């Protein structure tokens, strides 16, 4: 019970906090390294379903160099249309930076998993200890019965 009452909250809070802080470091790093640019499609994006498709885009970087890359865009977007894409410091197309919501969600998820792990470990230890103690008790009862049973059974035989 002490493990559950003390260990479960301690494990959940420490794991959740550690993951949240590490995720927030990633959020800050990505926010500093990535920015959005306006790019133009270099070809039509075919398709009529809802799934975004990869297409070639072209944009001019902050250094004045014309760059190209592949970005996910809505199907049916015509050639020459403008789209917003995320790029890193090197000018490579990348995904958007992680958000604080991502960090918070990761922290809560890891905290919950740690709590579940402590609870499951405690339940397994409880079950294992009970199994070992029950086997020991049954063995003692069996040994005592082997001593007592011949005396009892002799009473009922003429």
Image (tube, helix red, strand yellow):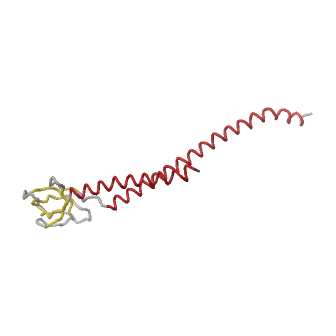
Residue 39, picture quadrant = bottom left
132 or 104: which is nearer to us? Answer: 104
Measured as percent of width and height from the top left, residue 103 is found at 34, 58
26 or 95: which is nearer to us? Answer: 26
In the picture, measured across the screen, residue 9 lies left or right of residue 21, that is right
In the picture, measured across the screen, residue 71 lies left or right of residue 110, that is left
In the picture, measured across the screen, residue 142 lies left or right of residue 79, that is right
- Residue 91 position (above or below residue 148): below
7 or 52: which is nearer to us? Answer: 7
Residue 36, picture quadrant = bottom left
In the picture, measured across the screen, residue 123 lies left or right of residue 71, that is right
Measured as percent of width and height from the top left, residue 87 is found at 18, 57
User: What's the residue at 45%, 53% (across, down)?
Assistant: 113
- Residue 140 position (above or below residue 79): above
**Quadrant in which the C terminus appears:** top right
Measured as percent of width and height from the top left, residue 142 is found at 74, 36
């Amino acid at each position: 019970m002490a493990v559950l009452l003390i260990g479960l909250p301690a494990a959940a809070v420490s794991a959740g906090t550690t993951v949240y802080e590490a995720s927030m470091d990633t959020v800050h790093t990505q926010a500093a390294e990535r920015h959005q640019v306006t790019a133009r499609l270099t070809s039509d994006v075919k398709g009529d379903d809802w799934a975004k498709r990869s297409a070639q885009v072209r944009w001019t970087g902050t250094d004045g160099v014309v760059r190209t890359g592949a970005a996910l865009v809505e199907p049916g977007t015509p050639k020459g249309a403008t789209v917003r894409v995320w790029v890193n410091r090197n000018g490579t197309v990348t995904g958007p930076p992680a958000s604080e919501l991502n960090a918070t969600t990761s922290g809560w998820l890891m905290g919950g998993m740690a709590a579940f792990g402590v609870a499951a470990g405690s339940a397994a230890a409880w079950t294992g200890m009970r199994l070992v103690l029950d086997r020991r008790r049954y063995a003692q009862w069996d040994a005592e019965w082997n001593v007592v049973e011949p005396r009892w059974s002799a009473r009922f035989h003429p």
